[in-house]
Amino acid sequence: MIKKKSGYTVAILGATGAVGRETLEILEERKFPMIGLRLFASARSAGEVMTCLGKEYTVEELTDSSSFDGVDLAFISATDAISREYGHRLGAAGIAVIDDSAVFRMDDGVPLVVPEVNAAALHAMSRGIVSIPNCTTTPLVMALKPLHDAVGVKRVVVTTFQSVSGTGAAAMDELMDQTKDLLAFRDVTAKVYPYQIAFNLLPHIGSFSEGGDCSEEIKIAKETRKILGAANLRVTATTVRVPVLRCHSEAINVELERPLKANDARAALAAMPGVIVYDDPLKKLYPMPIDATGKDEVYIGRIREDESITNGLNLWVVSDNLRKGAALNAIQIAECLVQN
Ligand SMILES: NC(=O)c1ccc[n+]([C@@H]2O[C@H](COP(=O)([O-])OP(=O)(O)OC[C@H]3O[C@@H](n4cnc5c(N)ncnc54)[C@H](OP(=O)(O)O)[C@@H]3O)[C@@H](O)[C@H]2O)c1
């Protein structure tokens, strides 16, 4: 928790990245009580001028000798290496660290938080660090929480359709460049992904384990259990990168402990803060990435009973990975910390 003040000095490590830029926009939109702002990135973007709440800030190079004097709250949205190097250092200096990477998510004493689902976990913050979940875990737990509270969730089978912005700004450029090249009948170059992503999809996110799971699939299962406090919940995932710029979509099959009619599931999901049920297939209404881009809410549609198993339910979930999947969730955590 952060000592109550009328305004806070905020640092963003990775301010020039896809999440960092979104963080600046959302701090401005939500009028976060800021009295100071420090922006850090690599030498590549040091000196760039960025604007927030009508004021200009120059990006500083993050180095071993960077000083964080006076900083109350730091968002780390850079790389795993930067999180490893600065997370504990800033936390130990009394700065509240909100970390976007996977580095600390499963650590004891580091809450993994989606405020609508488990804000109370922030009370267990003992190392100065809070982690935000993976950008696919956040919408998944937003959808599962009301179902779990209503009738219990036993098993989850999720297939993700993840946009390239989940990999960062360079991947967005790669999709645009490859698309332009292909439309102009030129050869494409793949640098960020192992294969062409334009007009293609890759069933591969992160690194592969010996058993053949992607690291992203393992993260989803572990993080979901931690956030829902459901150690025995069975979760299996298949993660797929798709040629979409923004928003992750998920096809979710849930096996519930007790029966729940689709209409009751619809009502429970609609009552969940931060969720919009958008579900009228006969009128061709279902959520798509173009609907959820730039939006704060998690959109849920295609809610239907799955008769192939006992107490089965199918859902389709779409959410903006740069907002609720990253920057917005981090700022909502910061709002909880300063309110407490
Ligand atoms: N994208 C998502 O949907 C999403 C969702 C949840 C969590 N996350 C996590 O958020 C973090 C940022 O992701 P992103 O998508 O914003 O990546 P990104 O677009 O690649 O941005 C990376 C940022 O880190 C900075 N950076 C890289 N190396 C650095 C170094 N050595 N020293 C200082 N700054 C350095 C970059 O600065 P330069 O501009 O100078 O290179 C840039 O500001 C990652 O940990 C990611 O796993 C991302």
Image (spheres, rainbow, N blue to C red):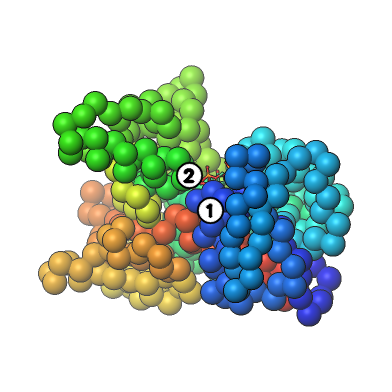
**Residue underneath mark 1:** 19
Side of 245 relative to 42 (left or right): left
Of residues 209 and 174, which is closer to you in this image?
Answer: 174
The quadrant the N terminus occupies is: bottom right
Q: Earlier in the sequence, mark 1 or mark 2?
A: 1
- Residue found at the very far left of the displayed protein: 282
* Residue 217 visible in rendering: no
On the rendering, which quadrant does ligand 1 occupy? Answer: top right
Of residues 112 and 263, which is closer to you in this image?
Answer: 112
Disc 1 to disc 2: CB gap under 8 Å: yes
Asked whether mark 2 lies closer than 8 Å to ligand 1, one says: yes
Amino acid carrying label 2: it is Gly
Secondary structure of the residue carrying tag 1 is: helix
Asked whether mark 1 lies closer than 8 Å to ligand 1, one says: yes
Secondary structure of the residue carrying tag 2 is: loop
Compared to residue 171, the image places residue 37 above or below, namely below
Give the percent coordinates (x, y) of residue 235: 45, 44
Side of 131 relative to 146 (left or right): right
- Residue found at the very far top of the displayed protein: 210
Of residues 72 and 309, which is closer to you in this image?
Answer: 72
Query: Which residue sits at x=20%, y=68%?
Result: 285
Side of 299 relative to 103 (left or right): left
Compared to residue 106, the image places residue 321 above or below, namely below
In three-dimensional space, the C-alpha distance between marks 1 and 2, rounded to whole angstroms, equals 8 Å
Query: Which residue sits at x=74%, y=68%?
Result: 36
Give the percent coordinates (x, y) of residue 117: 56, 65
**Residue underneath mark 2:** 168
Compared to residue 138, the image places residue 265 above or below, namely below
Query: Which residue sits at x=43%, y=32%?
Result: 192
